[in-house]
Image (cartoon, helix red, strand yellow):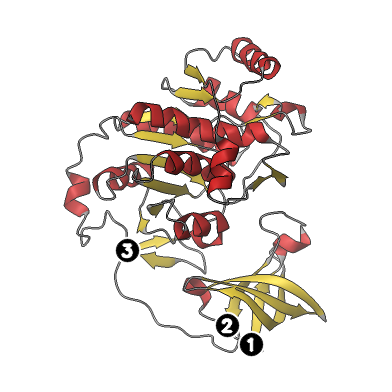
């Protein structure tokens, strides 16, 4: 059972066409809440809201806010036109989108007649925070390269929750977004990763594609029980469609958990047991001791079947500072966990070499 409470809108902190960040009064305490306009309509100061308070009561990180279930002062709304594909299917919040694949779509025949990705470089990450350094390195080197971001449904479902995406689009560092599965709100909606990759190539005309889940990730401390495991079958999908599959490894020497030291056990599991294709794995580490640690992990875990490319130089910090991008992952900044962010930008640097 979810936890639900009634709250009154105290103030609106931020709003655009898609999302409202608000302060609500619950039991005489002012707390943070998020309202998705496509699901529940606009709210105003003084409105009485029914809120899902589960995440706050569980003390979650990314999901640590209340979410509006209904505006009790404005309960009814009308259906918007276009589209027949449902997301959040068979839940009280199921919503209709106009998917690019639909027969009524002007893109239907283009998608249906697709042949190959023609070696289009597709980088696949496991955490949403990998997106920013990846994009920054490419756009700093060549602003003309068109980048498409595909957001999976492995974590947050509404793309409008992502402040990273909002910032990158405002700075024109991402050219288009695609949301797949039950995630929603992208410039293009697609049913799955295969059609999303086709849209990226044939409709967006992307030079580079980045794929990852939205904010948040599920982990259980078990070998296979984490939502980032999707990286494996997404990489296989890229290869199946004729793309160049690039796996962004999760690397850290700042994480206190031993299973995430060096190459994370998540990445090792994916490269060893999940992905069936041979893929490219850029390793952007220049420190000799840390590099040796990574070499030993690759050998010990017998994942040499993939093509590991060790990058000779790094411009991550330079590119982030150039675009004034402040990034964090698991609460850590670049200075606190540089190898994590360098892993993402290393994939971008590798792709740049191939695009020259």
Q: Nearer the viewer, mark 3 or mark 2?
A: 2
Q: How many marks?
A: 3
- 146 horizontally vs 263: left or right: left
Q: Residues within 10 Å of mark 1 (few under 14, many from 20)?
A: some
Residue 222: x, y in percent?
68, 32
- 298 horizontally vs 279: left or right: right
Asked which secondary structure carries label 3, the reply is loop
- The N terminus lies in quadrant: bottom right
Asked whether residue 12 is in view, the answer is yes
Instruction: Name the one closer to the observer, 273 or 214.
Output: 214
Which residue corresponds to mark 1? 47
- The C terminus lies in quadrant: top left
- Please give the label number shown on residue 220: none
Which residue corresponds to mark 2? 43
- Mark 1–mark 3 Cα distance, whole angstroms, equals 31 Å
CB atoms at circles 3 and 2 under 8 Å apart?
Answer: no
Residue 338: x, y in percent?
66, 34
């Amino acid at each position: 059972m979810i936890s639900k409470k009634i709250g009154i809108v105290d103030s609106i902190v931020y709003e655009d066409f898609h999302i409202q960040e608000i302060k609500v009064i619950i039991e005489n305490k002012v707390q943070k809440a998020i309202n998705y306009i496509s699901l529940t309509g606009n709210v105003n100061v003084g409105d009485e809201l029914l809120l899902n308070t589960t995440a706050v009561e569980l003390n979650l990180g990314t999901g640590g806010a209340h979410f509006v279930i209904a505006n009790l002062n404005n309960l009814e709304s009308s259906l918007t036109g276009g589209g027949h594909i449902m997301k959040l299917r068979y839940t009280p919040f199921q919503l209709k989108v106009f998917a690019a694949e639909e027969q009524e779509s002007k893109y239907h025949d283009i998608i249906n007649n697709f042949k190959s990705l023609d070696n289009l470089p597709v980088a696949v990450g496991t955490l949403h925070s990998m997106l920013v350094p990846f994009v920054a390195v490419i756009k700093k080197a060549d602003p003309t390269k068109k980048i498409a971001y595909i957001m999976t449904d492995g974590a947050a479902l509404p793309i409008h929750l992502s402040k990273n995406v909002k910032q990158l689009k405002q700075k024109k560092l991402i050219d288009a977004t695609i949301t797949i599965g039950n995630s929603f709100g992208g410039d293009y909606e697609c049913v799955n990763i295969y059609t999303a990759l086709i849209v990226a190539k044939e409709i967006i005309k992307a030079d580079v594609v980045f794929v990852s889940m939205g904010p948040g990730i599920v982990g259980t401390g078990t070998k296979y029980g984490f939502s980032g495991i999707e990286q494996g079958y997404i990489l296989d999908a890229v290869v199946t469609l004729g793309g160049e599959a690039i796996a962004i490894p999760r690397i850290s020497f700042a994480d206190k958990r031993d299973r995430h030291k060096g190459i994370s056990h998540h990445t090792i599991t994916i490269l060893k047991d999940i992905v069936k294709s041979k893929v490219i794995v850029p390793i952007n580490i220049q420190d000799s001791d840390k590099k040796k640690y990574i070499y030993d992990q690759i050998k010990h875990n017998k994942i040499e079947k993939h093509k590991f490319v060790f990058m000779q130089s790094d411009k991550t910090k330079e590119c982030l500072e150039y675009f004034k991008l402040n990034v964090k992952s698991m609460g850590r900044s670049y200075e606190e966990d540089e190898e994590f962010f360098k892993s993402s930008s290393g994939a971008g640097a590798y792709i740049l070499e191939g695009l020259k």
